[in-house]
Image (tube, rainbow, N blue to C red):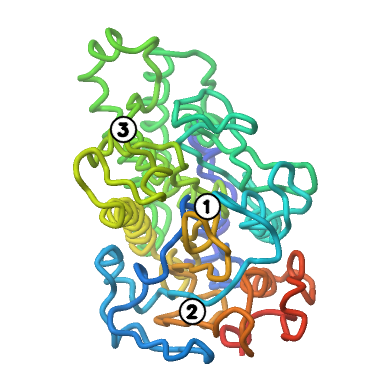
Amino acid sequence: MTGSRRRFLKGVTLGAGGVVLAPLVRQMEAHAAGRARDLPRRFVFVIKSSGLTPKAIRPVDVKLGDGRRTVDLPLKDYKLPETLQSLEAFKDQMMILEGLSGCNFEGNHSSYYGALSCHHAPEKPVAATVDCLLGKLNPAPFLNYGFAPNGHSIGNNSGPTVQDTAVFPKISACGQNNPMPYQASAEKAYRQLFGSALDLKAGGKKEFDLQTNLLDFLADDTKKLAKEVGKEEREKLDHYLAAFESVRTRNDQLVGMQEAIKKNAPKFTSQYASTVFTDRVSIFFELAAAALITGLTNVISIRADWLSVKYDTFGFKTTSVHDIGHGKTTDNGFSAEKARDTIRKFQVDLIADLAGKLKKVPEGDGTMLDNTMIIYLSDTGEAHHSQRREWPFVVVGGTNMKLKTAGRYLRYPDYGSKGHKTIGNWYNTLLRANGAPHQDHFGQVDPNLKDLDLKGPLAELTG
């Protein structure tokens, strides 16, 4: 891009979509000027409940030996397990990480804030969580944004009802006694993220029409920008519009459902009407893609499910995630193992879809996925009732973060063995790579591992 075009972008006058477009314009300026250091680093934390079974995410035919040594293998030489098959196209940009522990804080069905803070905090947070800290290191209009489609709140974990207010799933915290709110309503999330471009105070049909108009304004302003920038910038604008087009498509579908919605719902909301749990989760992933591409936030946390959720879509109409965790056969005849696989595949497929959208957006010398790390984990380690001696992660993207995560299966030695590491080491690694001050430990130190060296980041990813 020439200097004159950069000056144009700084002085361009946009319409109603200008507020939403502003972060994107700043990214385009950095891209055009070749300032890779100014391109944002992004993180998406996808947190599931009831454990993430190591064997279910481990590449086929991997041999662990006696568990006393580090296993470091290239993913390209191994087949991904069935529930991770949708990530096959991203094998060179992903890491499966095993062997870390999180026994330095308590937990049972959930480790709550401890899963991301490494502190014992079942009711109130005692320290900031890693996602909130990364948000401060990678600022955007929204430092962090949380989605929790199951809508439970502090003191109310009773079920997956849709709520119109912010909820606090006891996962993320900005600091001591400062829990981070998650949005349980897709309509509210849309209004918070994109409503600054128009006055979206009304409800029902009127607001639906206003949001449809907002998409038109965004399209008009994006086309205006496209006339002034080069080919690469136009390509990024095309993907930006595509992210919003998925929202527009769903709006168009809702138009044909208005009568049914009016008849069967308490009110006709402006955004997403479905009360089906899997629909709500999918919608939040769509909104996450749009928010990241737009530049409204660089850190998103998605609470993928909760123990009381029943996956009606898969025929688990009376069998909850908690029931499945206790080995119960679902009401449609799935074994607990098959049910867990079905749920995991659904979540991983959404991650793959998000990664695919980001990979299509050019940025710097690569794509947005190179600058975005998607981290899939459980809030309670490896099992429904976990001792947290094993805490697996699936990591996709983020290859520009100066960490050696690309195309690896990495497993650390068993708990207590020489060379064993904790999730605190992993989070310390992420923070150090993003400019955080040096610290020996992240979170509490496990007193049972006092004879091991648990200081600093993971050398295998940074050395």
Instruction: State which tag comes first along the sequence, 2 or 3.
Output: 3
Residue lying furthest top in this view? 263
344 left or right of 22? left
SS type, badge 1: helix
Q: Which residue is depicted at the point 42% across and 29% down?
A: 214
Instruction: State which tag comes first along the sequence, 2 or 1.
Output: 1
Question: Mark 2 to mark 1: distance in Å?
Answer: 30 Å
Q: Which residue is depicted at the point 53% across and 51% down?
A: 295
Q: Which residue is depicted at the point 39% across and 44% down?
A: 321
Badge 1 amino acid: Val
| Disc 2 crowd, CA 10 A, few/some/many (<14, 14-19, 20+) | many
Residue 95: horizontal and vertical position, in percent?
44, 75
| Disc 1 crowd, CA 10 A, few/some/many (<14, 14-19, 20+) | many
Q: Which residue is mark 3?
A: 318
108 vs 403, nearest the viewer: 108
| Disc 3 crowd, CA 10 A, few/some/many (<14, 14-19, 20+) | few
Q: Which residue is mark 1?
A: 25
Question: Mark 2 to mark 3: distance in Å?
Answer: 40 Å
Mark nearer the viewer, 1 or 3? 3
Residue 85: horizontal and vertical position, in percent?
25, 67
Badge 3 amino acid: Thr
118 left or right of 336? right
Q: Which residue is mark 2?
A: 405
Residue 393: horizontal and vertical position, in percent?
48, 67
SS type, badge 3: loop
Q: Which residue is depicted at the point 47% across and 50% down?
A: 49
Question: Mark 1 to mark 3: distance in Å?
Answer: 48 Å
Badge 2 amino acid: Thr
Residue 219: horizontal and vertical position, in percent?
37, 38
252 left or right of 441? left
